[in-house]
Image (cartoon, grey):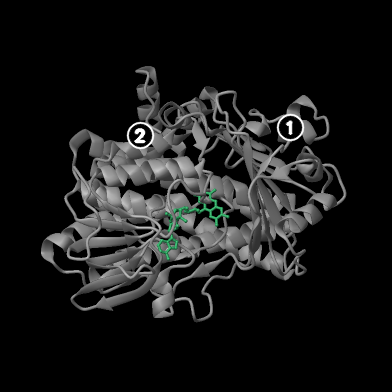
Amino acid sequence: MSSAQPSPDRTYDVAILGSGLGGSMLGAVLARHGARVLLLDAESHPRFAHGEVPTPRSMVALRVVAERYGVPELKTLTSFENLTRILGPQFGIQRHWGFLRHREGERQDPREVTQSVTPALMHTAAHLYRQETDSHVYHTAVRYGCTPRQGFRVTELELAGDGVTVAGQDGSEYRARYLVDASGRKSPVADKLGLRDGPSPLKHRSRMAASHLIGVRPTDGVLAARSPRDVPPVPWHQGSVHHLFDGGWIWVTPFDNTPRSRNPLCSVGLMLDPQRHPDAAGSGADEVGTVAARFPDIGRQLDGAAAFREWEVVAAVPYASSQLVGDRWCLLGESAGFVDPLFSRSLSDTTEAVNALAWRLLRAIADDDFSADRFDYLQRLQRGFLSFDDDLVRSAYAAFDDYDLWNAVFRIWAWGSGGGSFRLQSALTKFLADGREEHFTALEDVPHVGFCWPDHDGFKALFDGLVARAEAHRAGTLTGREAARDLFAMLEEADFVPKHLGFAERDERFLNPTPKKIIRSLRWARTGADPQVRRLLMGNVQHAVGSRLRGRRIF
Ligand SMILES: Cc1cc2nc3c(=O)[nH]c(=O)nc-3n(C[C@H](O)[C@H](O)[C@H](O)COP(=O)(O)OP(=O)(O)OC[C@H]3O[C@@H](n4cnc5c(N)ncnc54)[C@H](O)[C@@H]3O)c2cc1C
């Protein structure tokens, strides 16, 4: 396998704009299967990127792409252990997802917290230090034969019926049979075709200030003393902390939270709803400083911390492109759109889009047919992701002013992610047993494309119920308590929401699936669960336990 110098005399099968995780992952897969791929990027690796918090869903999706397309290097990203062993001591540990609600001028109330703990059956995930992970996937793509070109800024694009031409600032020009734009917010294809010109289809609005800091204090140390029952099963510092408050939130994602890391940095970012917080404070540091001054424990955590890189400020975070595929081109991942980093869904969305795009592109190359209708599913999938992310995030922001409602949002998010991830893992397990592609193609045949759990009508109805109540709360026609009461009644009644694991039990602030709770839940599933949940829970948990007993982990 070798990559040539980029050549204007050659026609590539696929040109990919953007060698971030999305573009490089796709490039690696296509090149691994013999496609001639040109991988272009305006910058050079290693370079900074957002997207440091993985989810169980993104870990399963990465394993799916790794196994389905034979690119095992992608599995490096799926555990803290692998990342640290292979790429070095640069990564933080992620043992939980934590949310702490704050009230202005007050110490954080120990009762107004929620935490979702990574079960011992799963690999421990890492806070992804993106300059390392992205370089790794980029180098993998080049090793499999992608032709790289870094420091290439696109100045002109031609999307013609017989091929695509990409021209750069240095006067070089390259031709390809198909163009994938994985460059993100500033997508040249979206720009050229005016795909962001109309009103945004997204309802959510937010602005952002983010940086990497040195000297951020561990969360546990800045909170007021708590009684044993208010102490979470995993220290806050050992995972991804989300400080929530009326109209916004702050993430604290440490890379320095394990003795095995030598990275002193901590990622910190602030998101604000401009309707609740109309006055921007100017610089990113001022914006964060203003919020830190209003919430004492957040202030304590950031007191004395210094920004290691410039604060990045984005005035309008959400955006969406009106068309995502065309003849000979498509938009991938954040070129298609982005909602908000809350719940960190983009990496799984992008990876699942790569999974759906790669086999279609390989077939299109073989058939020499790159018409848009062959890629229609990719458009529906990414639109579905954006629409779900929009509804979920908007509902969550509406709940930030009321702990009861937030508590319901948290559980519905957590179990929706769980059900969707189990479904993906079941297909992967079957594929690993018999190598048949159809387990993955069957995943596409669903009623709610792009929804977190796309083939469960009951869960979809529960989620729609959440969105409606969150909107009513936002409009002032329902109190948070009333909305939460309805949602908990639905959660308790649903035979597709597992019992005993905390998803349906509103007083369990900490979702901590201990072996005892898992056994109780499996007993319930045998007789009380709807058939799909019974299959998903029993199949995956039994497989995970069996693997663990043999010293392996499947998740
Ligand atoms: C503030 C923030 C926080 C986030 N947090 C999370 C999170 O916690 N978890 C999660 O899953 N996702 C998160 N995301 C989303 C995450 O950043 C993306 O899903 C992830 O980076 C996917 O990688 P990508 O390859 O699509 O984009 P990127 O990593 O952004 O790569 C795009 C590449 O395109 C290149 N490029 C840009 N313009 C051009 C051009 N004109 N020509 C050529 N190349 C170009 C860039 O140099 C870059 O290398 C977050 C996003 C934001 C904005």
Residue on which the image places disc 1: 220
Say left or right for 311 vs 550: right
Give 11 or 354, whichever is nearer the viewer. Answer: 11
Residue 355 appears in the figure:
no
Q: Residues at badges 1 and 2 in contact (C-beta under 8 Å)?
A: no
Task: Depth check: give the residue in front, 305 or 292.
Answer: 305
Identify the residue position indicated by label 2 in the image. 539
Seen from the viewer's position, the closer of residues 495 and 294 is 294
Quick one: label 1, few (<14), some, or many (20+) residues within 10 Å?
A: some
What's the CA distance linking mark 1 and mark 2?
Answer: 37 Å
Amino acid of disc 2: Gly
Q: Quadrant of the N terminus?
A: top left
**Residue 496 sits above or below residue 432 on the image:** below
Residue 233 screen position, x and y as percent:
65, 28
Q: Residue at x 62, y 38 (%)?
A: 265
The residue at 49%/65% (across/down) is 185
In the rendered image, is residue 181 in sight?
Answer: yes
**Compared with residue 155, is residue 527 higher up or lower down, i.e. above or below?**
above
Residue 301 locus on image (x, y percent): 76, 40
- Tell me which amino acid carries mark 1: Asp
Which quadrant of the structure image shows residue 419? top left
Name which residue lies at 58% across and 62% down: 467
In the structure shown, which secondary structural element does the residue marked by tag 2 occupy? Answer: helix
Secondary element at tag 1: helix
